[in-house]
Image (cartoon, rainbow, N blue to C red):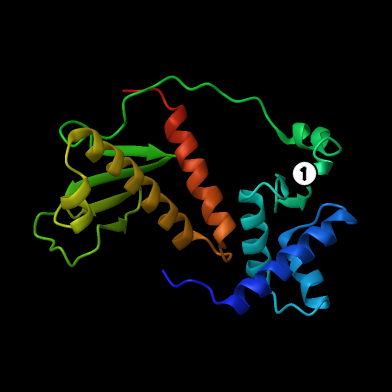
Amino acid sequence: MVEPSENSKVRLEKEYDFILDFLINSKPVTGKDMARAGRENGFDWAREHANSRLYTLWRLGKVLKIETEKAPLWTLPIYAEKYAEAQSGLRKTNTVYLEKELPLTADRSMDIEIAGTKIEFAFNYKMSSNDAYMYGDWLEDKIFVSLNPNHPFWGTFIVDEEKISLQLTNTAIDVYVQWQVVRSVAPIDSVKLLHLRDAAMREIASKDSN
């Protein structure tokens, strides 16, 4: 790992100091807002630059992250009590899930349904280590997935039945999300992808075990 130069360290310290000074007299801001403020003060920042600085300060306990339904807001820890009520309003009661068996097992069930979409699996032992870990084919009433047991990830990590079941379940989620992207008429951004995957995981977790 390359150590930052002295000039880089000085520049970063100035950027961190700017953020902390700015937040003293500001209402909570997003990373996008902070990037704009940085540019107005001579820093060559896009949103990802501001976010990187904010998360570094957050890990050090120097800024407070306020979760929202969209982008997080950032302020100083001294204002934690002031915004505690807003935070508590966003927190929902946790649902307690009972531990279950994974829905897919290599020796028993090789199909699963996610949000009404049936997904069937089969291992293709003719696939090589250079082929993708899976291929999905979209049929009229279901998705058929060819799994590559010769993929280096399988050979390295998927070494017992429990891990096979977990990998099959995660692959089902992957191919379901791919199918949603293929059939969507509107562009799908990274946030939408996250929501699709999250919804699929929640549906699987809420289903009764077979």
In the rendered view, does 150 fall on the left or right side of 182? left
Which residue is disc 1 drawn over?
A: 77
Which quarter shows the N terminus? bottom left
Q: Give residue 148's quadrant in the image.
A: bottom left
Q: Position of residue 163 (x, y in %)?
A: 25, 38
* Residue 80 visible in the current orientation: yes
Q: Is residue 127 above or below residue 123?
A: below
Q: Which image quarter: residue 57?
A: bottom right
Q: Is mark 1 on a helix, strand or loop?
A: helix
Residue type pointed to by label 1: Pro
165 is higher (above) or lower (below) than 71: above
Q: Where is residue 70 in the image (x, y as percent from the top left)?
A: 70, 51
Picture quarter with the C terminus = top left
Q: Is residue 169 left or right of residue 192?
A: left
Residue at 52% x, 49% y is 196
Foreground of the two, 202 or 78: 78
Q: Residue 183: x and y, percent?
A: 47, 60
Circle 1 packing at 10 Å, graded few (<14), some (14-19), many (20+), is some
Residue visible at 55% across and 64% down? 185
Q: Nearer the viewer, residue 84 or 77?
A: 77
Return the residue found at the far right. Answer: 25
Q: Position of residue 142 (x, y in %)?
A: 34, 48
Res 14 quadrant in image: bottom right
- The structure residue drawn at horizontal position 75% and vertical position 51%, both measured from the top left corner, is 73
Res 33 seen here: no
